[in-house]
Image: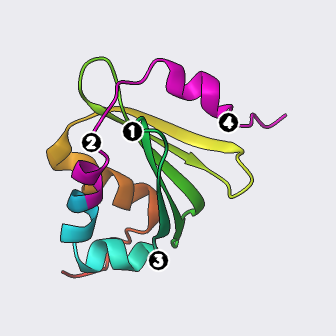
Amino acid sequence: MSTKINLQTYLANKNLMDVNQPFTLIKRSGPIAMSWGCHAFTNLGNKALRFMVHGHHHTGHVYITLNGLDYYDVLLTTSKGTIIEEMNDISWDELVERIDVRIEKINSYQF
């Protein structure tokens, strides 16, 4: 059986954050984020940044939150909220790369 995200429960133990920080990191990555087909960026009460992607490996939502250790957690779900994968304790300088590996990255791509 697939698990669906319960946003209230998921966000309950997440820290407040400035969602502009991960948003800016993603936008500054240029062609990497463009290859994800990301759109529909949404601030979920300053607890999460959610956006849609249409990548080679994953199509659906990406949630970025800040955990109690001040690292990012990333949750991938389908567009209907079924949880695909959760990645925890990601530092700001590896956020885009870690997301890219799960969304789009193909080793033969050259940047």
Taking 86 as reference, is 65 left or right?
A: left
- Residue at position x 85%, y 34% from top? 1
The residue at which mark 3 appears reads as 37
For residue 91, the mark is none
- Kindly identify the amino acid type of the residue bearing the numbered disc 3: Gly
Kindly identify the residue that appears in the image at 37 percent across and 68 percent down. Answer: 105
Position above or below: 100 against 64: below
Q: CA distance from mark 4 to mark 2?
A: 22 Å
Q: Position of residue 49 (x, y in %)?
A: 42, 48
Position in image of residue 67 (x %, y %): 34, 24
Q: How many marks?
A: 4
Label 1 and label 4: CA atoms lie apart by 18 Å
Asked which secondary structure carries label 4, the reply is: loop
**What amino acid does circle 1 point to?**
Asn
Residue holding disc 2? 18
Left or right for 101, reference 86:
left
As drawn, which residue projects farthest toward the front?
Answer: 45
**Residue under the point 46% across and 39% down:** 45
Q: Hey, what amino acid is under mark 2?
A: Asp
User: Residue 86, position in %: x, y?
Assistant: 50, 36
Magenta span contains residue 9? yes
Where does label 1 land, which residue? 46
Cα gap from disc 1 to disc 3, whole angstroms: 23 Å
Q: What is the C-alpha distance between the residues marked 1 and 2?
A: 6 Å
Q: Does label 1 or label 3 sit earlier along the sequence?
A: 3
Which span of residues is magenta-colored?
1-23
